[in-house]
Image (cartoon, rainbow, N blue to C red):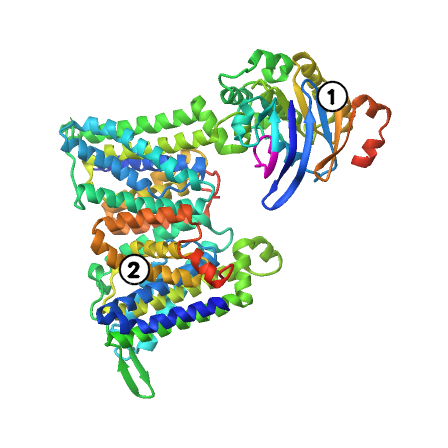
Amino acid sequence: MSELIPIILDVSSYILILVLVALGLMIVFGMMGVINMAHGELFMIGAYVTVAAQGAGLPLMAGVLLAPVVVGFLGLLIEAALVRHIYLRPLDTILATWGLSIALKQLVVLTFGPESHSVTLPIDGSLEIGAFSYPLYRLLLMATSILLIGGTFWLFTRTDFGLMARAVIARPDTAASLGIDTRRMYRWSFVIGTALAGLAGALVAPIISVDPQMGLGYLVPGFLSILVGGAGPLAGVLVGGAVVGGVNNLLAIWISPVAALITVYIIAILIIRLKPEGIMGGRRAK
Amino acid sequence: MRNNLIALLVFAILAAAPILIGGYWTGQLTAYLVYGLLAMSLSLVWGYGGILCFGQAMFFGIGGYIMAVLTKGMIAPELTSSYLGLIAAMAGSALFALALGYFLFAGRGISGAYLAIITLAMALVLERLMNNWYALGGYNGLLNVPPIKLTFFGASYELWDRTATFYAGRAVVALVYFLVTWLLSSAYGLKLTASRTHPDRLASLGYNVLTIRLSVFALSAAIAGLAGAIFVTLDGFASPTLIGFTLSTDALIWVAFGVKEMLLAAFLGAILTRTAESWLSEIFGEYWILILGIAFMISVVLLPKGLLATPLEKLTGGKGR
Amino acid sequence: MLEIENLSAGYGEALVLRDFSCRIDSGKVSALMGRNGMGKTTLMKTIMGLIRAKSGRIMVDGVAIEKLTTHQISRIGMGYVPQGREIFADFTVAENLRLSLLGHEGGNVLTLEQIYDWFPILKERAEQRAGTFSGGQQQILAIARALIGGPKMLLLDEPTEGIQPSIVHEIGVQLSHIARETGLSILIVEQNVDMVRTLADEVLFMENGVIKECCDIEALRQDDSLLHRYLSV
């Protein structure tokens, strides 16, 4: 039993990070029908903000706070320069953001080098209860993630911004004819989505190795989580993330990382194929 | 008709290339021809079939591994014929595509963005699988794949020489090009266009849309498999990079640079991008990939029909098909 | 107040409106009548900027609006009740109304009390999900949602479609009352003759994308040959 708890906690923290990444993807996908293939790179840049902050001698918390601002601002630029022009051509957004992901990845290689970096844990201690011990930072990470996920749900279901956003998702023309500036809603949703990715990257940076290729390893599972859970209700992301992240991590521990990856992708593809609207229902892709 | 003339001209210019560019570049150009073949296969399935496949290198890699396994005599020493290898590579890729396609398209089916994500995930799975399949060389791949051995009536000739290999490759590519162009101009091409633009209407006319989709997916896979099979004989090795995700997305870039609805443009897109890459990557070094990514973005946003399509359409007069 | 000059608009290459011109005075209720497929809904959508005009002008109080976006057109005082009502089924009544208030923030909006005073049923069911409403109740909500933004002119596209006659009459009477009380201009596209007779001050007949005839409601009450000609009633 006491060996099982750290495993459950490890798996949960992975799932929570995956949900954060997928949540950002889904806001952009659900809102604008845009598939952002550069989302993984924005997550990666968030992690690199903490690397840069560490290099400049700043505390990690400064990096974590800076990451969503930097990446969100980057998202604002991307929306204005790229996505705005093609959001009515959904397949082209896949290609264009793919080009963006190549460019961003190489930009990071040019700035920080191709090698991997590590970020030191800001909190060293462990929580010890009897024989049980678990790193404090991971607990903090989980708590922060839960707060962020809850905060995003709150934003989209309980606030005026959320009301307008849900209206734009359901009936963009009608929302516009009631005076809602749909373009502005698209822009800020995109910024929120990218800022979430940046924040997730910064939070996870101290417990993984940070390298320019890390984005893809979160992008694909993130997408699969959305498709498995269903792109309609926000709760779909939680279920999808739990299925994809949970199966992946548990199999990686019990069998091998390769078998885990292959199995989880195949399970995800099966679910998507057999239940295209996702476990929790919702809309299909346009 | 004019389209075919342009294509003839392109292949004629290619025929003169070895005289002009010397041995090293002839060898490189042969590889680019094979990439061009891969680009054509993607153009067929994406531009004409309307199936955005983010993992086209899966079929390239499967063809390459089948060719390597057979001609190295890993199955049986008697089964090392290059012809058999090429046919098995095409058949193997096509069968894999049929199985995958049936799973993806049958019934309610999957299309658009979902298809892109799923084919991308499939390519990642296969790459990971090959990296860890130690009987097939694992991460290092299979080395010492023999060159293609042509036999006619007892006489045989091994394609060691760069120039000879180049001409053989050019002949295959030209043959595939004209065969596919002929096929697309037949009634099949019409059905294919209808299955892309008005699948419901086509179905109500009594055609089976699934059969048409599967056929174009398998045909495209066979061409990609052929390309992969030729490719492994050029450098003599098959590795997991052939099957994976990077080559798949490279192919997408070539095709999008050319234009997806035009076989010749896709083919030239591959050759020109690869050529530019080998020159410009020396000049720009690490910045080259950055430039490529940005150029790709700009081309998708500003020139949705592709960088090469506009001039080529002018030359061929009109629609370019 | 609304002037349209030489407007051409349509879907893709196909033009539905060609050189359409008309003029709607303020403070009046004008009904636009015509058979199906004559371009009435296209006209409404083009005024709201949901379909881009190919050429021509649309002026509201002397301001050209044909290049503005839909939300800007809404904010200068054009309220729109689309065909099929298009209420947000997952939202409560209060949320549907709140959305319109948010869209017109800082503008000349009405109060919830005012709306509830006109349509008491909305107050009773403020927290109910709009998707559970009957067609007539949804129509009342859609009209209230447009009104709360404080429009100068209300565009109503087939408000009686699929609604039981008793509620049709109720809506007509209430709208007529609101128009007289507030001086609101209304442009209504309608096939239902009773609704037009209850509500309208003047009637415009449309055929093949142009206005063929215009008459006031008194003339129509005495002689309904126009109705026969343009609607084949």
Determine whether the residue tagged by mark 1 lies in a helix, strand or loop: helix
Query: What residue did someone put label 1 on?
Result: C199
Position in image of residue A30 (x %, y %)? 44, 36
Q: Is residue C216 left or right of residue A269?
A: right
Q: Amino acid at mark 1?
A: Leu
Q: Nearer the viewer, residue A183 or C162?
A: A183
Q: Which residue is at a point 49% across and 18% down the rendered structure image?
A: C105
Q: Is residue C186 left or right of residue C148?
A: right
Instruction: Please give the range of residues in magenta.
Output: C46-56
Q: Nearer the viewer, residue C12 or A48?
A: C12
Q: Is residue C51 magenta?
A: yes
Q: Quadrant of the N terminus of chain C?
A: top right
Q: Amino acid at mark 2?
A: Arg
Image quarter of residue A24: top left
Query: What residue did someone put label 2 on?
Result: B274
Residue B66 appears anywhere in the view: no
> Is residue B312 positioned above or below C81 on the image?
below
Q: Chain of mark 2?
A: B
Q: Quadrant of the C terminus of chain C?
A: top right
Position in image of residue B83 (x %, y %)? 34, 77
Instruction: Tell me whether circle 1 and circle 2 mark residues in contact (CB < 8 Å).
Output: no
Q: Is residue C125 left or right of residue C217?
A: left
Position in image of residue C218 (x %, y %)? 82, 21
The Cα–Cα distance between marks 1 and 2, rounded to whole angstroms, is 71 Å
Mark 1 against mark 2, which lies toward the viewer?
2
Residue A61 appears anywhere in the view: yes
Q: Which residue is at a point 37% across and 43% down the rendered structure image?
A: A223
The number of callouts visible is: 2
**Chief SS of the magenta region:** loop
Determine whether the residue tagged by mark 2 lies in a helix, strand or loop: helix
